[in-house]
Amino acid sequence: MFTGITGNVFILGLVSFFTDVSSEMIYPLLPLFLTGMLGAGPAFLGVIEGVAESTASLLKLFSGIASDRVRRRKRLVLMGYSLSALMRPLIGSAASPLAVLLIRTGDRVGKGIRTSPRDALIADSVDPSLRGKAYGFHRSMDHAGALVGPLLATFLLAFFVKDLRQLFWLAGIPGVVAILLIAWKVTETERTPEPKARLQLAMLPPGGLRRYLVILFLFTLGNSSDAFLLLKAGAVGTPSYRLPLLWAFFHLVKMLSNMPFGALSDRIGRRSVIVAGWCVYALSYLGFGVARSEWQIWLLFGVYGLFFGLTEGVEKAFLVDMAQPTQRGAAFGWYNFAIGAGALPASLIFGGIWQYEGNVAPFLFGASLAGVAALLLIMLVRPQKDIDDAV
């Protein structure tokens, strides 16, 4: 089952586990904290999520390119995780929605610094025939942390902590564990730096990789923050104390599905698995749009979790398949930039439609863009196996 999971992949999986324990103790409660305690509305929630994620994605481009130019990707990884671990608990001191925006943006700056170098380091550390499985394992560990985080938050709120602010401060402890794991256990891989990496900032990668990134951007325009799904859950009557449990269930599905679907993509090809995932996304968003009861929300969160299992690790493995070995950091930088360039308008559009047209129309918009993106991926991007056979 764990064949091909090297030491670096395993440790980086643990790092993501503890990081997500920390962040997911906070995230499912953040919409309630913002709207209930600080007086923010759905539109400002969209601003916070969009600005934070877009900032992260812009930095992922720079850090990815920088990681191709240096011998030690680990330093960038450590720097990014350390910044996030220091910023995240400060939400416990926030007195206004603007303060949350600034703190969450700082947290995402750390994510922007670490993500592309970390993903490139995983690619450097694993056999090409097992990339899908390796990225699937990493994402599974990430979601395992996202499963434990809400459960731990629920336990603490039920028995020990009565104030959300206190809970947010306690969420800093697992982040410190992640930093120590990177510092002591992650090792560098033998590789030749790319001295011309700085030139790649001026242009998108060519050929099929460029088309893939443009289609990802289109898909992302309909893929708003998952915080809106929690708002939808509340709108149909899900009580606040069950929101962390719903979030934990969601991550359980993602954790269990990521590695099997990643391994499947190693056997049958990446593109077909990604297309299936985007179709599942469209169907789940259609369901969220018309959902009217709590049991429907639970069912839809389960289906939506399968979308992540089908796409998260597989999209990254597909990217590595098409990228030059000396430019993997830059490829991940552009991948994350394409997603982030769509994240801000996606959340702004979704929040605006919700506020002025109700909570059905934005889900229909997201489902439509996912369907269009799936068709374009089939039509315009050839699987890597077909390209290799033609050469």
Image (cartoon, grey):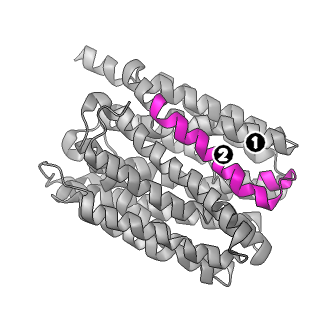
Instruction: Give the residue type that dot 2 points to.
Output: Phe
Give coordinates of residue 314: x percent, y percent: 43, 34
Give coordinates of residue 221: x percent, y percent: 59, 47
Disc 2 element: helix
Residue that mark 1 sits on = 298
Give neighbour class at mark 2: few <14, some 14-19, many 20+ (Cα, 10 Å). Answer: many
Measure the alpha-carbon separation of dots 2 and 1. 8 Å
Instruction: Give the residue type that dot 1 points to.
Output: Trp
Residue that mark 2 sits on = 249
Residue range of the region highlighted in magenta in the rendering: 232-261
The reply to whether residue 364 is in sight is: no
Residue 44 got which mark?
none
Q: Residue at x 62, y 52 (%)?
A: 346
Question: In front here: 290 or 208?
Answer: 290
Identify the image quadrant of the N terminus: top left
Q: Residue at x 19, y 54 (%)?
A: 188
20 in relation to 309, above or below: below
Q: Residue at x 70, y 35 (%)?
A: 284
Give coordinates of residue 15: x percent, y percent: 39, 57
Identify the image quadrant of the C terminus: top left
Farthest residue in the top direction? Answer: 389
